[in-house]
Image (cartoon, grey):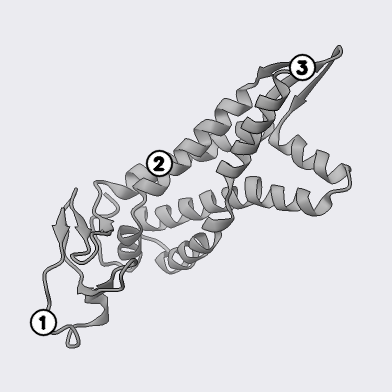
Amino acid sequence: MSDFPPEPSLSSLPVEQLVACHECDLLMRKPVLQDGESAECPRCGYELFSHRHHVVRRSLALVLTALLLYVPANFLPIMQLNLLGQTSQDTVWSGVLGLYESGMQGIAVVVFLCSMAVPLLKLLCQLLVLLSIRLDFGRGYGLLLYRIYHHMREWGMLEVYFMGILVAIVKLMDLADLSLGLGLFCFIALLLVQVWLEVTMSPHQIWEALSGEDIHAGD
């Protein structure tokens, strides 16, 4: 763990060598970190960033895993409901269609965007950004896509949809014969992989790699 050294005069330093704490706005000189080290603000102790091993390679593996899980998570049955002799299978996609056909088109569009469209677009943006670094090609487009990805982060709400699924399962257990489907386990795996990806894909290393400052990020 690395703290920032005090700087008596920051006004003479280039902007790219400075960093501001996201919590207390303290302006500091950006330290040079080695693999496995992290930088903390000396005023409030907030961890600004860390330097992780093989960040692009590990992130690519997680993105590809998430993309493989995306289709079964959204189109395989999440649960099978048997009520009064009638059996129905529910998926994420069938839930969107059910809302649309029942007259709640606005809610259906929001659910589709937040649970299916935006998560997929986020994964595709991450994939293209990582490939631009790994292949050293089109990093200008990678910068644009990474900015777009950060704007979309607040709209991907898989965890909110998952909480809705859990509430529905708990309420339906006493009313009908309920069995969990493979789609639910794929959905949980997709959610966990995306969380792991957020932790692994260190933003400052990606920005530096896209701008050509970190030559080791693609290792």
Q: Which residue is mark 2?
A: 196
Q: Are marks 3 and 1 in contact (CB under 8 Å)?
A: no
Relative height, residue 11 to residue 55 (above, below): below
Identify the image quadrant of residue 181: top right
Q: Which quadrant would residue 163 be assigned to in this image? A: top right
Q: Residue at x 62, y 31 (%)?
A: 166
Q: CA distance from mark 3 to mark 1?
A: 70 Å
In this view, 26 is above or below 77: below
Q: What is the quadrant of residue 34 in the picture?
A: bottom left
Q: Secondary structure at mark 2?
A: helix
Q: Earlier in the sequence, mark 3 or mark 1?
A: 1
**Is residue 77 in view from this perspective?**
no
Q: Secondary structure at mark 1?
A: loop
Q: Earlier in the sequence, mark 2 or mark 3?
A: 3
Instruction: Give how far across and how far down residue 63 sits, in percent.
Output: 46, 43
Residue 176 numbered mark, or none: 3
Residue flagged by tag 2: what amino acid is it?
Trp
Q: Earlier in the sequence, mark 2 or mark 1?
A: 1
Tell me the kind of residue under disc 3: Ala
Q: Nearer the viewer, residue 73 or 40?
A: 40
